[in-house]
């Protein structure tokens, strides 16, 4: 099973220390969230898993960590200054700010005409007194330097709205220092910022978020089959995380939805909204895999040879084309871009892992069946009698012996049934119980989260036992 809706996860996440509403003691900050002790472990495990799969386990990949604040010219030539915006409309009556592309109208050729003809109603107060739409740029602005005036254009900078551009401007640096040949890729994980007009749905859409992006450079003409390979490769990654195949689907973006730079984009959707009646509305984007063509490398190149003479760039000092030694050809590589959000991946794995089970007393228990590699805590060490110093001492010693190799915790703050339930709810794959018998036979009970089956394991074998089961569990 999976969570019946996002609200179930919001409540679990707050109750058990995964995710808290940010700035809560000051009334919160719209759609900002803080990751708690378990949330930060889960995020780190997602990122480490992605990095291992994307970078370490491949021969054609390099990593990068570029700046969040880049030279403003990057966003000029990437097209973000001009086109990265939503059309906004203000209601003069109730002062509500509305996204023009979400307003309903009929009988007019355009939204501008419809607003002028008073054919559009404010969804908040029904007034037809609306301003004309104007573009609202989604990039967060800031200024650089101590003396900078607020409106000084030479000091203006942006928080990056995507990590991708940091990769494109380092294409030659990575290519030459690592002596790479096309095809190869550059991967990056990092925070991005978008001043969304309508964020929401918990950590699904937030103004500050973390991306896991990779740009794969290929020879033009070889881009289409490589793109398809990446779609399949990425789809498979989510399956290896244990996400139910029925809750994933591939979505081919229709031509009219494509970004201006994209030749083809396929999204991987997750069923984030299972409670919605209409099946089509249950899905939303978990990852996008785009063919960005040679748009970005050309755009950032010093005076690229563009047939129409467009996008000439007098500000760049480099030509980011590639010279193929074997064929003696020079070209701008095409780029295949798989881009996923850390936060959406966390939400999807939490929703998918959510399970309810009834115990033999007829009580409902929540079990978070997280992939063992993603589980924030791998083993909880529990003493069966907390007033018996020998048992407590042995349990704490076991915890200390495990903690250099796997995330272990010690807990004696309740009866054993309650302690088991607590670990099930946060997805801990194994509980290790130390009892009176342990003092004599140097063995402990290992309880499995998913089956609730128990087995007796020698303390001397415990670390290897847990590690091998963590690896083979899925
Ligand atoms: Zn209004």
Image (cartoon, rainbow, N blue to C red):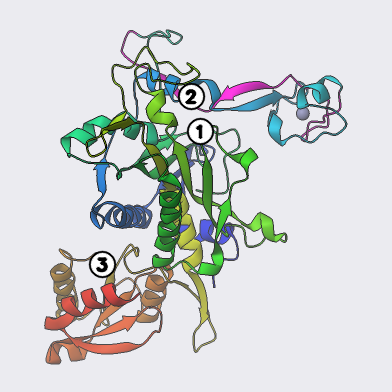
Closer to the chain start, of discs 2 and 3, is: 2
| Label 2, residues with CA under 10 Å away: few <14, some 14-19, many ≥20 | some
Element class at badge 2? loop
For the point 40% across and 38% down, which residue is it? Answer: 334
Give the total number of marks visible in the rendering: 3
Magenta stretch, overall SS: loop
- Which image quarter: residue 320? top left
For the point 42% across and 33% down, which residue is it? Answer: 294
Q: Position of residue 213 (x, y in %)?
A: 38, 44
| Label 3, residues with CA under 10 Å away: few <14, some 14-19, many ≥20 | some
Label 2 vs label 1, nearer the camera: 1
Classify residue 423 as left or right of residue 178.
Answer: right
Q: Quadrant of the C terminus?
A: bottom left
Residue placed most toward the observer, 339 or 451: 339
Task: Give the labeled residue for mark 2.
Answer: 79
Tag 2–tag 1 contact (CB < 8 Å): yes
What is the CA distance from the residue labelled 2 to the residue labelled 3?
A: 49 Å
Residue placed most toward the observer, 246 or 319: 319
Element class at badge 3? strand
What span is in magenta? 118-147
Ligand 1 picture quarter: top right
| Label 1, residues with CA under 10 Å away: few <14, some 14-19, many ≥20 | some
What is the CA distance from the residue labelled 1 to the residue labelled 3?
A: 49 Å
Asked if disc 2 is less than 8 Å from ligand 1, the answer is: no
Task: Give the labeled residue for mark 1.
Answer: 261
Q: Residue 211: tell me if it is visible.
A: yes
């Amino acid at each position: 099973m999976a969570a019946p809706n996002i609200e179930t996860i919001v409540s679990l996440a707050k109750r058990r220390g995964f995710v808290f509403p940010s700035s809560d003691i000051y009334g919160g900050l719209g759609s900002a969230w803080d990751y708690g002790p378990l949330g930060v472990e889960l995020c780190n495990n997602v990122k480490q898993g992605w990095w291992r799969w994307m970078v370490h386990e491949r021969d054609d990949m390099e990593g990068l960590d570029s700046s969040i604040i880049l030279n403003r010219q990057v966003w000029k030539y990437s097209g973000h200054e001009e086109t990265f915006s939503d059309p906004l409309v203000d209601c003069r009556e109730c002062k509500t700010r509305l996204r023009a592309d979400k307003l309903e109208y009929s009988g007019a050729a355009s939204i501008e005409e419809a607003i002028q003809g008073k054919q559009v109603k404010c969804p908040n107060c029904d007034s037809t007194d609306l301003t004309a739409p104007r573009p609202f740029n989604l990039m967060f602005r800031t200024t650089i330097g101590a003396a900078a005036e607020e409106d000084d254009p030479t000091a203006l900078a942006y928080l990056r709205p995507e990590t991708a551009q940091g990769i494109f401007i380092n294409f030659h640096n990575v290519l030459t220092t690592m002596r790479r040949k096309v095809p190869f890729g550059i991967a990056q994980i990092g925070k991005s910022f978008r001043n969304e007009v309508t964020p929401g749905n918990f950590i699904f859409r937030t103004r500050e978020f973390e991306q896991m992006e990779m740009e794969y450079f290929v020879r033009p003409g070889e881009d289409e089959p490589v793109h398809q390979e990446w779609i399949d490769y990425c789809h498979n990654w989510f399956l290896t995380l244990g996400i139910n195949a029925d809750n994933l689907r591939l979505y081919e973006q229709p031509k009219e939805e494509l970004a201006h730079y994209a030749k083809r984009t396929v999204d991987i959707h997750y069923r984030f909204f299972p409670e919605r009646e209409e099946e089509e509305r249950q899905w939303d984007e978990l990852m996008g895999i785009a063919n960005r063509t040679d748009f970005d490398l050309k755009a950032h190149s010093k005076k690229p040879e563009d047939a129409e003479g467009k996008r000439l760039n007098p500000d760049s000092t480099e030509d980011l084309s590639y010279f193929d030694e074997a064929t003696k050809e020079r070209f701008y590589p095409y780029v295949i871009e798989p881009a996923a959000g850390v936060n959406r991946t966390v939400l999807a794995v939490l929703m998918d892992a959510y399970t309810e089970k009834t115990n033999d007393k007829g009580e409902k228990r929540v079990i978070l069946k997280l992939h063992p590699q993603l589980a924030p805590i791998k083993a909880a060490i529990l003493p069966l009698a907390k007033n018996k110093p020998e048992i407590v001492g042995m349990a704490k010693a076991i915890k200390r012996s495990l903690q250099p190799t796997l995330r272990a915790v010690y807990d004696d703050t309740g009866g054993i049934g309650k302690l088991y339930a607590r670990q099930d709810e946060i997805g801990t794959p194994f509980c290790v119980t130390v009892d009176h018998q342990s003092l004599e036979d140097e063995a402990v009970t290992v309880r499995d989260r998913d089956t609730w089956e128990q087995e007796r394991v020698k303390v001397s074998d415990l670390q290897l036992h847990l590690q091998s089961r963590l690896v083979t569990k899925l």
